[in-house]
Amino acid sequence: MTDLRLVIFDVDGTLVDSQAEIIGAMAEAFAAEGLTAPTREVVLSIVGLSLPESFRVLCPDQDASTRERLTAGYRAAFRDYATADLQRKSPLFPGAREAVLRLHAQDHTVLAVATGKSKRGLDRLIDQHALQELFVSRQTSDLHPSKPHPAMIHAALAEAGVPASRAVMVGDTTYDMDMARAAGVATIGVGWGYHPADSLRADRMIPTFAALDAAIDDLIGEPA
């Protein structure tokens, strides 16, 4: 159906506020290696990258084996945080659930996710926040090269059967925006995320989820 349109969401910093878990898990991973953890600002600056790429950016002077241990330590720590109480510690941003449900109810709008999370982490988050069956495509970092490579968006477009001209990426980082631009997809930046809003250079910026529908309609047309 050529009249379908696709809305692709980032997760961390866009749909959910997971910074407490990310920063906590990062601190534990660095402490286990006897290293000083990066500051909160530095950690949030790499949210959206795959874990291996994150540690290449954070630890350019460490060898590959150290970065592999950091990656494993982070994953273990994050799992511990998540199993403790993900709904409380990684809450949906205000209006996120309502926006996703509203778009999902439209006959000619389909939804996807493109995230730096692993498939296991994304599936667990979707289950705990009761967002099952809402996304026709779930693209994760363990299936693709790290953002800003456009592979995740190319896969989401193919899975949804929607051309790039009828799709939009909603995200909070420069990695999201650069990934979308590389795939020829329109961009919507959110003003509440982990990268400074003025760094995104998005086609549209929204201050709250209440403004999302109008931005989507403006960029890729209203649903038929």
Image (cartoon, helix red, strand yellow):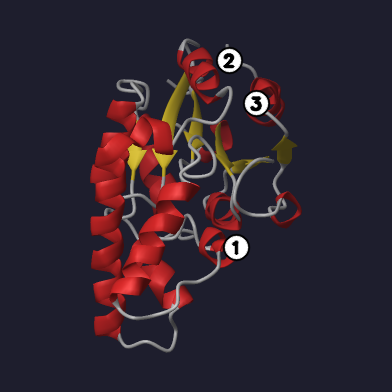
- Provide the secondary structure element on which disc 2 rests: loop
- Quarter placement of the N terminus: top left
Q: Please name the residue shown 65% across and 40% down the image.
A: 192
> Would you say residue 119 is visible in this rendering?
no
> Would you say residue 100 is visible in this rendering?
yes
Count neighbours of disc 1 (C-alpha within 10 A) and say few if under 14, some if 14 to 19, many if 20 or more.
few
Q: Are marks 3 and 2 in contact (CB under 8 Å)?
A: no
Count neighbours of disc 3 (C-alpha within 10 A) and say few if under 14, some if 14 to 19, many if 20 or more.
many
C-alpha separation, residue under disc 3 versus residue under disc 1: 27 Å
Q: Please name the residue shown 31% across and 77% down the image.
A: 67
First along the sequence among labels 3 and 2: 3
Task: Please provide percent x and percent y for residue 204.
Answer: 73, 38
> What amino acid is found at the position of numbered circle 1 in the picture?
Glu
First along the sequence among labels 3 and 1: 1
Q: Is residue 115 left or right of residue 205?
A: left
Farthest residue, direction right: 198
Q: Is residue 116 left or right of residue 118?
A: right
Task: Please provide percent x and percent y for residue 201.
Answer: 72, 52
> What amino acid is found at the position of numbered circle 2 in the picture?
Pro
Return the residue at label 3: 212
Q: Height in image: 127 above or below 153?
A: above
- Provide the secondary structure element on which disc 1 rests: helix
Which of the numbered marks, if any, corresponds to residue 41? 1
The answer to which image quadrant residue 128 occupies is top left
Which of the numbered marks, if any, corresponds to residue 223? 2
> What amino acid is found at the position of numbered circle 3 in the picture?
Leu
Q: Nearer the viewer, residue 210 or 86?
A: 86
